[in-house]
Image: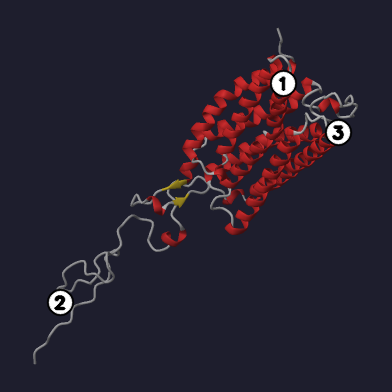
Amino acid sequence: MPSLNNYGKIDAAAMVIYIPIFAVSLVLVFRYGFKRDAGWIFLSIFSLIRIVGGALMVAAELVQPVNTTLYTIAFVLEAAGLSPLLLATLGFLRTIGQNSTGNRAQSALVFRLLTLIGIAGLALSIYGGSNAASTDPDKQKNSNTYRHIGSILYAVLYVLLALLHVGYWFHFRSLMKNRRTLLTAISCALPFLGIRTIYSVLSSFSGSLLATTSSEPNTNSLAKFNMASGDWRIYLVMDIIMECIVTVIYTIAGAKIPLQQDYHMNATGNPDEEHHLYGGQTGYLPPTEQSYYPQNAYAPASAPYAPQTAYDPESSAPYHKEERIAYAPPPVQAYSK
Protein backbone atom coordinates (compact mmCIF):
# COMPACT_ATOMS: atom_id res chain seq x y z
CA MET A 1 0.00 0.00 0.00
CA PRO A 2 1.38 3.43 -0.90
CA SER A 3 2.50 5.64 1.96
CA LEU A 4 3.22 9.33 2.35
CA ASN A 5 6.75 10.60 2.03
CA ASN A 6 8.05 13.54 4.06
CA TYR A 7 6.51 16.09 1.71
CA GLY A 8 3.13 14.39 1.92
CA LYS A 9 3.24 14.27 5.71
CA ILE A 10 4.15 17.97 5.90
CA ASP A 11 1.32 18.96 3.55
CA ALA A 12 -1.15 16.78 5.46
CA ALA A 13 -0.21 18.50 8.73
CA ALA A 14 -0.45 21.93 7.10
CA MET A 15 -3.90 21.08 5.74
CA VAL A 16 -5.12 20.31 9.27
CA ILE A 17 -3.61 23.53 10.64
CA TYR A 18 -5.24 25.73 8.02
CA ILE A 19 -8.77 24.41 8.57
CA PRO A 20 -9.36 26.43 11.79
CA ILE A 21 -7.43 29.38 10.32
CA PHE A 22 -9.77 29.36 7.34
CA ALA A 23 -12.80 29.33 9.67
CA VAL A 24 -11.50 32.31 11.65
CA SER A 25 -10.58 34.19 8.49
CA LEU A 26 -14.15 33.76 7.22
CA VAL A 27 -15.43 35.33 10.43
CA LEU A 28 -13.08 38.26 9.87
CA VAL A 29 -14.31 38.60 6.29
CA PHE A 30 -17.90 38.90 7.50
CA ARG A 31 -16.82 41.33 10.22
CA TYR A 32 -14.86 43.70 8.00
CA GLY A 33 -16.59 43.10 4.67
CA PHE A 34 -15.81 41.35 1.42
CA LYS A 35 -13.92 44.26 -0.10
CA ARG A 36 -10.64 43.10 -1.57
CA ASP A 37 -8.78 46.15 -0.25
CA ALA A 38 -9.48 45.03 3.32
CA GLY A 39 -7.05 42.08 3.04
CA TRP A 40 -9.14 39.55 4.94
CA ILE A 41 -10.66 38.02 1.81
CA PHE A 42 -7.15 37.24 0.52
CA LEU A 43 -6.27 35.63 3.84
CA SER A 44 -9.29 33.34 3.43
CA ILE A 45 -8.32 32.52 -0.14
CA PHE A 46 -4.78 31.69 0.95
CA SER A 47 -6.01 29.35 3.69
CA LEU A 48 -8.35 27.62 1.27
CA ILE A 49 -5.52 27.16 -1.26
CA ARG A 50 -3.37 25.51 1.39
CA ILE A 51 -6.19 23.16 2.42
CA VAL A 52 -6.94 22.11 -1.16
CA GLY A 53 -3.26 21.89 -2.09
CA GLY A 54 -2.46 19.69 0.90
CA ALA A 55 -5.36 17.37 0.10
CA LEU A 56 -4.24 17.06 -3.51
CA MET A 57 -0.65 16.28 -2.50
CA VAL A 58 -1.82 13.54 -0.15
CA ALA A 59 -4.07 12.13 -2.85
CA ALA A 60 -1.26 12.26 -5.44
CA GLU A 61 1.04 10.19 -3.23
CA LEU A 62 -1.60 7.62 -2.33
CA VAL A 63 -3.13 7.11 -5.75
CA GLN A 64 -1.74 4.29 -7.88
CA PRO A 65 -0.70 4.38 -10.66
CA VAL A 66 1.00 7.77 -10.32
CA ASN A 67 -1.22 10.63 -11.50
CA THR A 68 1.00 13.49 -12.64
CA THR A 69 -2.03 15.79 -12.97
CA LEU A 70 -2.59 15.71 -9.21
CA TYR A 71 1.06 16.52 -8.60
CA THR A 72 0.96 19.35 -11.10
CA ILE A 73 -2.11 20.98 -9.55
CA ALA A 74 -0.67 20.58 -6.05
CA PHE A 75 2.63 22.23 -7.05
CA VAL A 76 0.81 25.01 -8.91
CA LEU A 77 -1.24 25.80 -5.79
CA GLU A 78 1.91 25.69 -3.68
CA ALA A 79 3.66 28.22 -5.89
CA ALA A 80 0.59 30.41 -6.41
CA GLY A 81 -0.31 30.55 -2.71
CA LEU A 82 2.25 33.26 -2.02
CA SER A 83 0.32 35.78 -4.12
CA PRO A 84 -2.81 35.95 -1.88
CA LEU A 85 -0.59 36.24 1.19
CA LEU A 86 1.23 39.22 -0.32
CA LEU A 87 -2.05 40.75 -1.48
CA ALA A 88 -3.48 40.28 2.03
CA THR A 89 -0.52 42.27 3.37
CA LEU A 90 -1.19 44.93 0.76
CA GLY A 91 -4.83 45.09 1.82
CA PHE A 92 -3.87 45.52 5.47
CA LEU A 93 -1.50 48.35 4.56
CA ARG A 94 -4.31 50.00 2.65
CA THR A 95 -6.54 49.67 5.71
CA ILE A 96 -3.83 51.31 7.83
CA GLY A 97 -3.63 54.29 5.49
CA GLN A 98 -7.37 54.98 5.45
CA ASN A 99 -8.11 58.67 6.09
CA SER A 100 -4.43 59.24 6.90
CA THR A 101 -2.84 59.81 3.50
CA GLY A 102 -2.80 63.22 1.92
CA ASN A 103 -3.52 62.49 -1.75
CA ARG A 104 -6.16 59.78 -1.94
CA ALA A 105 -6.13 59.57 -5.73
CA GLN A 106 -2.38 59.07 -5.79
CA SER A 107 -2.56 56.48 -3.02
CA ALA A 108 -5.29 54.57 -4.87
CA LEU A 109 -3.10 54.48 -7.98
CA VAL A 110 -0.12 53.12 -6.02
CA PHE A 111 -2.20 50.35 -4.45
CA ARG A 112 -3.72 49.49 -7.82
CA LEU A 113 -0.28 49.10 -9.39
CA LEU A 114 0.91 46.90 -6.53
CA THR A 115 -2.19 44.73 -6.92
CA LEU A 116 -1.47 44.31 -10.62
CA ILE A 117 2.08 43.15 -9.81
CA GLY A 118 0.70 40.50 -7.47
CA ILE A 119 -1.88 39.32 -10.00
CA ALA A 120 0.73 39.18 -12.78
CA GLY A 121 3.03 37.08 -10.60
CA LEU A 122 0.12 34.77 -9.80
CA ALA A 123 -0.80 34.31 -13.46
CA LEU A 124 2.79 33.57 -14.52
CA SER A 125 3.29 31.11 -11.67
CA ILE A 126 0.12 29.23 -12.58
CA TYR A 127 0.93 29.14 -16.28
CA GLY A 128 4.52 28.08 -15.67
CA GLY A 129 3.58 25.39 -13.18
CA SER A 130 0.84 23.97 -15.39
CA ASN A 131 3.44 22.98 -18.01
CA ALA A 132 5.87 21.49 -15.52
CA ALA A 133 4.90 17.90 -16.37
CA SER A 134 5.20 18.36 -20.12
CA THR A 135 7.46 15.94 -22.01
CA ASP A 136 8.28 18.66 -24.54
CA PRO A 137 11.68 20.19 -23.67
CA ASP A 138 10.65 23.54 -25.11
CA LYS A 139 7.52 23.67 -22.95
CA GLN A 140 9.54 22.74 -19.90
CA LYS A 141 12.00 25.52 -20.65
CA ASN A 142 9.17 28.02 -21.06
CA SER A 143 7.61 26.71 -17.87
CA ASN A 144 10.76 27.47 -15.90
CA THR A 145 11.04 30.91 -17.51
CA TYR A 146 7.52 31.88 -16.50
CA ARG A 147 8.15 30.60 -13.00
CA HIS A 148 11.31 32.71 -12.81
CA ILE A 149 9.47 35.87 -13.85
CA GLY A 150 6.56 35.15 -11.51
CA SER A 151 8.83 34.67 -8.49
CA ILE A 152 10.77 37.85 -9.33
CA LEU A 153 7.50 39.78 -9.40
CA TYR A 154 6.70 38.35 -5.98
CA ALA A 155 10.07 39.59 -4.72
CA VAL A 156 9.51 43.04 -6.22
CA LEU A 157 6.07 43.23 -4.62
CA TYR A 158 7.49 42.23 -1.25
CA VAL A 159 10.19 44.92 -1.40
CA LEU A 160 7.61 47.58 -2.30
CA LEU A 161 5.33 46.43 0.52
CA ALA A 162 8.22 46.65 2.97
CA LEU A 163 9.05 50.19 1.79
CA LEU A 164 5.39 51.22 2.06
CA HIS A 165 5.28 49.76 5.55
CA VAL A 166 8.36 51.81 6.53
CA GLY A 167 6.71 54.92 5.10
CA TYR A 168 3.73 54.44 7.40
CA TRP A 169 6.07 54.29 10.38
CA PHE A 170 7.39 57.73 9.43
CA HIS A 171 3.76 58.99 9.54
CA PHE A 172 2.87 57.01 12.64
CA ARG A 173 1.32 59.97 14.48
CA SER A 174 -1.18 60.57 11.68
CA LEU A 175 -2.51 57.00 11.78
CA MET A 176 -5.71 56.11 13.59
CA LYS A 177 -5.34 54.46 16.97
CA ASN A 178 -6.03 50.77 16.28
CA ARG A 179 -4.46 50.89 12.84
CA ARG A 180 -1.18 51.61 14.57
CA THR A 181 -1.48 48.22 16.26
CA LEU A 182 -2.19 46.57 12.91
CA LEU A 183 0.97 48.21 11.54
CA THR A 184 2.92 46.66 14.41
CA ALA A 185 1.50 43.24 13.52
CA ILE A 186 2.64 43.67 9.91
CA SER A 187 6.10 44.62 11.16
CA CYS A 188 6.22 41.33 13.06
CA ALA A 189 5.06 39.33 10.03
CA LEU A 190 7.23 40.87 7.31
CA PRO A 191 10.53 39.11 8.22
CA PHE A 192 8.86 35.70 7.99
CA LEU A 193 7.08 36.69 4.80
CA GLY A 194 10.45 37.77 3.40
CA ILE A 195 11.97 34.33 4.06
CA ARG A 196 9.01 32.71 2.32
CA THR A 197 9.47 35.02 -0.67
CA ILE A 198 13.17 34.20 -0.88
CA TYR A 199 12.33 30.50 -0.89
CA SER A 200 9.89 31.07 -3.75
CA VAL A 201 12.63 32.70 -5.83
CA LEU A 202 15.19 30.01 -5.04
CA SER A 203 12.70 27.25 -5.77
CA SER A 204 11.77 28.70 -9.15
CA PHE A 205 15.46 28.69 -10.17
CA SER A 206 16.07 25.17 -8.83
CA GLY A 207 15.01 23.31 -11.97
CA SER A 208 11.88 21.54 -13.14
CA LEU A 209 9.20 20.61 -10.63
CA LEU A 210 8.40 17.18 -12.07
CA ALA A 211 10.78 14.63 -13.52
CA THR A 212 9.66 13.13 -16.82
CA THR A 213 11.12 10.55 -19.15
CA SER A 214 12.74 13.29 -21.20
CA SER A 215 14.08 15.23 -18.22
CA GLU A 216 17.70 15.11 -17.23
CA PRO A 217 18.70 14.62 -13.58
CA ASN A 218 18.49 17.82 -11.57
CA THR A 219 22.08 18.99 -11.25
CA ASN A 220 21.16 22.57 -10.47
CA SER A 221 23.18 24.20 -7.70
CA LEU A 222 19.87 25.23 -6.09
CA ALA A 223 18.35 21.74 -6.35
CA LYS A 224 17.95 21.48 -2.59
CA PHE A 225 15.41 24.34 -2.72
CA ASN A 226 13.18 22.50 -5.20
CA MET A 227 9.75 22.09 -3.62
CA ALA A 228 9.27 18.72 -5.31
CA SER A 229 12.62 16.97 -5.05
CA GLY A 230 14.74 19.16 -2.78
CA ASP A 231 15.51 18.98 0.93
CA TRP A 232 12.21 18.56 2.81
CA ARG A 233 13.64 20.27 5.89
CA ILE A 234 14.28 23.44 3.92
CA TYR A 235 10.76 23.19 2.52
CA LEU A 236 9.35 22.78 6.03
CA VAL A 237 11.21 25.74 7.55
CA MET A 238 11.32 28.28 4.72
CA ASP A 239 7.89 27.53 3.27
CA ILE A 240 5.36 25.90 5.61
CA ILE A 241 6.47 27.32 8.97
CA MET A 242 7.02 30.84 7.61
CA GLU A 243 3.55 30.88 6.06
CA CYS A 244 1.95 29.57 9.24
CA ILE A 245 3.61 32.24 11.38
CA VAL A 246 2.50 35.05 9.05
CA THR A 247 -1.05 33.71 8.85
CA VAL A 248 -1.35 33.28 12.61
CA ILE A 249 -0.08 36.83 13.22
CA TYR A 250 -2.62 38.27 10.79
CA THR A 251 -5.46 36.14 12.17
CA ILE A 252 -4.76 37.09 15.79
CA ALA A 253 -4.42 40.74 14.83
CA GLY A 254 -7.74 40.69 13.01
CA ALA A 255 -9.50 38.95 15.88
CA LYS A 256 -8.03 41.13 18.65
CA ILE A 257 -7.74 44.61 17.13
CA PRO A 258 -11.07 46.52 17.12
CA LEU A 259 -10.55 48.44 13.89
CA GLN A 260 -14.16 49.68 13.89
CA GLN A 261 -13.47 51.64 17.07
CA ASP A 262 -11.26 53.99 15.09
CA TYR A 263 -14.54 55.67 14.23
CA HIS A 264 -17.33 56.90 16.48
CA MET A 265 -20.73 58.40 15.82
CA ASN A 266 -21.41 61.99 16.68
CA ALA A 267 -23.85 63.04 19.39
CA THR A 268 -26.84 62.71 17.05
CA GLY A 269 -26.06 59.04 16.44
CA ASN A 270 -25.87 59.60 12.71
CA PRO A 271 -23.44 57.05 11.21
CA ASP A 272 -22.92 59.34 8.24
CA GLU A 273 -21.23 61.86 10.50
CA GLU A 274 -18.40 59.75 11.90
CA HIS A 275 -15.24 61.29 13.25
CA HIS A 276 -11.84 59.63 13.28
CA LEU A 277 -9.99 58.85 16.50
CA TYR A 278 -6.27 59.53 16.49
CA GLY A 279 -3.68 58.68 19.11
CA GLY A 280 -6.08 57.21 21.65
CA GLN A 281 -8.47 60.17 21.88
CA THR A 282 -11.96 59.13 22.90
CA GLY A 283 -14.10 62.15 22.29
CA TYR A 284 -12.45 63.83 19.40
CA LEU A 285 -14.28 66.37 17.25
CA PRO A 286 -12.68 67.85 14.16
CA PRO A 287 -11.14 71.28 14.77
CA THR A 288 -13.72 72.91 12.48
CA GLU A 289 -16.43 71.99 14.95
CA GLN A 290 -14.48 72.49 18.15
CA SER A 291 -13.52 76.05 17.31
CA TYR A 292 -17.12 77.30 17.27
CA TYR A 293 -18.15 76.30 20.75
CA PRO A 294 -16.50 76.47 24.19
CA GLN A 295 -15.47 73.19 25.82
CA ASN A 296 -18.12 73.41 28.58
CA ALA A 297 -21.31 71.72 27.51
CA TYR A 298 -24.16 74.02 26.52
CA ALA A 299 -26.51 74.25 23.59
CA PRO A 300 -26.02 77.21 21.26
CA ALA A 301 -28.98 79.35 20.38
CA SER A 302 -31.37 77.69 17.98
CA ALA A 303 -31.48 80.80 15.78
CA PRO A 304 -29.29 83.92 15.58
CA TYR A 305 -30.36 86.74 17.89
CA ALA A 306 -33.24 84.73 19.28
CA PRO A 307 -34.48 86.43 22.50
CA GLN A 308 -34.03 84.20 25.50
CA THR A 309 -36.04 86.26 28.06
CA ALA A 310 -38.82 88.76 27.78
CA TYR A 311 -37.51 92.30 27.42
CA ASP A 312 -38.57 94.81 30.08
CA PRO A 313 -37.82 98.41 28.92
CA GLU A 314 -38.13 99.82 32.45
CA SER A 315 -35.77 97.29 33.95
CA SER A 316 -32.24 98.40 34.69
CA ALA A 317 -30.91 94.89 34.30
CA PRO A 318 -28.59 94.34 31.33
CA TYR A 319 -29.76 92.46 28.33
CA HIS A 320 -27.38 89.57 29.10
CA LYS A 321 -27.72 88.08 32.54
CA GLU A 322 -25.54 85.11 31.58
CA GLU A 323 -22.67 84.80 29.23
CA ARG A 324 -24.29 81.97 27.30
CA ILE A 325 -27.57 83.77 26.52
CA ALA A 326 -27.60 84.88 22.93
CA TYR A 327 -27.79 88.60 22.28
CA ALA A 328 -31.32 89.89 21.76
CA PRO A 329 -31.77 93.51 20.58
CA PRO A 330 -34.59 95.50 22.22
CA PRO A 331 -37.78 95.64 20.25
CA VAL A 332 -38.69 98.86 18.52
CA GLN A 333 -41.03 100.93 20.71
CA ALA A 334 -43.66 103.28 19.43
CA TYR A 335 -43.57 106.69 21.17
CA SER A 336 -46.50 109.09 21.08
CA LYS A 337 -46.01 112.81 21.00
- Place of residue 70 in the rendered image (x, y in percent of width and height, measured from the top left): 69, 24
Q: Quadrant of the N terminus?
A: top right
Q: Amino acid at mark 3?
A: Pro
Q: Are marks 2 and 1 in contact (CB under 8 Å)?
A: no
Residue highlighted by disc 3: 137
Q: Residue at x 86, y 33 (%)?
A: 137
Q: Is residue 149 left or right of residue 327?
A: right
Residue highlighted by disc 2: 313
Q: Amino acid at mark 2?
A: Pro
Residue 103 seen in the current view = no
Dot 1: element: loop
Spatial CA distance of label 2 from label 1 is: 103 Å
Q: Amino acid at mark 1?
A: Asn
Q: Quadrant of residue 62?
A: top right
Residue highlighted by disc 1: 67
| Closer to us: 127 or 312 | 127
